[in-house]
Image (tube, helix red, strand yellow):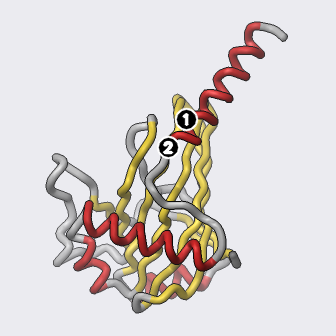
């Protein structure tokens, strides 16, 4: 085995170890487990980002992805599963996946929610076989550890994204470029 092969093996093993060590407290499997995770993620989100309570009350639907796992070593990707809630009830289940290429090394986990603020945005999301998060999403982001940008009382964007519960060694998280696909858990 050459030095380069050993370094690649060690780097890959290290990335897997980092990934295994990341945890935001939410696990995943069947419908009941996904629903339990979504409940836990929503409690965490409301605690970390209190402004989301008002968004949830006004939204036509909320897609909650309780745990997205992301890892990268030059080439990276992320994956997670969650539920779409309408009126507080899970109506569909989705996977979220993305791929990336570039300067990256490490692993992290985080949760995110997409608030569909209009019935039209929710209908468009549910109508297709897959939906990709793009530039049309307004994000609530942590500015100084205390306050969040985005006026939750006058949000004009039809879809608002919130990333929370981050753990790991890659800094930052976004849902832009993430592909959402309906699943049957």
Location of residue 97 in the rendering, given as x and y in whole percent from the top left corner: 61, 57
Counting the numbered discs, the total is 2
Crowdedness near tag 1: few (<14), some (14–19) or many (≥20) residues, C-alpha within 10 Å: some
Question: Of 47 and 122, which appears nearest the observer?
Answer: 47
Give residue 163's quadrant in the image: bottom left
Crowding at mark 2 (Cα within 10 Å: few <14, some 14-19, many 20+): some
User: In the rendered view, does 144 fall on the left or right side of 85?
Assistant: left
- Residue 41: % across, % down: 41, 67
Q: Say which quadrant the C terminus sits in.
A: bottom right
Q: Nearer the viewer, residue 63 or 48?
A: 48
The residue under the point 46% across, 71% down is 64
Asked if 172 appears above or below 67 in the picture, the reply is above
- Apparent side of residue 19 relative to residue 53 in the rendered image (left or right): right
Give 175 or 32, whichever is nearer the viewer.
32
**Residue visible at 47% across and 72% down in the picture:** 38
Would residue 120 be found to the left or right of residue 15 on screen? left
Tell me which residue sits at (46%, 83%) in the image.
85
In which quadrant is the N terminus drawn? top right
Quarter of image, res 155:
bottom left
The label number, if any, that marks residue 55 in the structure image: none
- The answer to whether residue 156 is above or below residue 177 is below
Q: Indicate which disc residue 18 carries.
A: 1
Residue 2 percent across, percent down from the top left: 81, 8
Q: Which residue is situated farthest in the right direction here? A: 1
Which residue is drawn at the image coordinates 67% and 28% (left, top)?
Answer: 13
- What residue is disc 2 on? 22
Tell me residue 9's x, y (percent). 73, 22
Between the C-alphas of marks 2 and 1, the distance is 6 Å
Image quarter of residue 184: bottom right
Q: Are marks 2 and 1 in contact (CB under 8 Å)?
A: yes
């Amino acid at each position: 085995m050459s030095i380069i092969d050993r370094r690649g093996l060690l780097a890959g093993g290290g990335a897997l170890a980092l990934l295994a060590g990341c945890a935001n407290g939410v696990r995943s499997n069947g419908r009941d487990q996904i629903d339990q995770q979504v409940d836990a993620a929503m409690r965490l989100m409301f605690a970390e980002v209190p402004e989301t309570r008002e968004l949830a009350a006004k939204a036509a639907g909320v897609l909650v992805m309780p745990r997205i796992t992301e890892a990268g070593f030059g080439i990276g990707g992320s994956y997670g599963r969650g539920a779409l809630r309408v009126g507080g009830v899970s109506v569909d289940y989705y996977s979220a996946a993305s791929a990336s290429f570039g300067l990256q090394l490490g692993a992290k986990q985080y949760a995110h929610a997409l608030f569909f603020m209009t019935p039209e945005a929710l209908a468009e999301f549910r109508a297709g076989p897959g939906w990709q998060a793009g530039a049309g999403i307004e994000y609530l982001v942590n500015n100084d550890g205390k306050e969040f940008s985005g006026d939750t009382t006058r949000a004009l964007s039809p879809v608002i994204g919130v990333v929370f519960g981050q753990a790991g060694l890659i800094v930052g998280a976004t849902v832009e470029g993430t592909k959402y696909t309906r699943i049957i858990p």
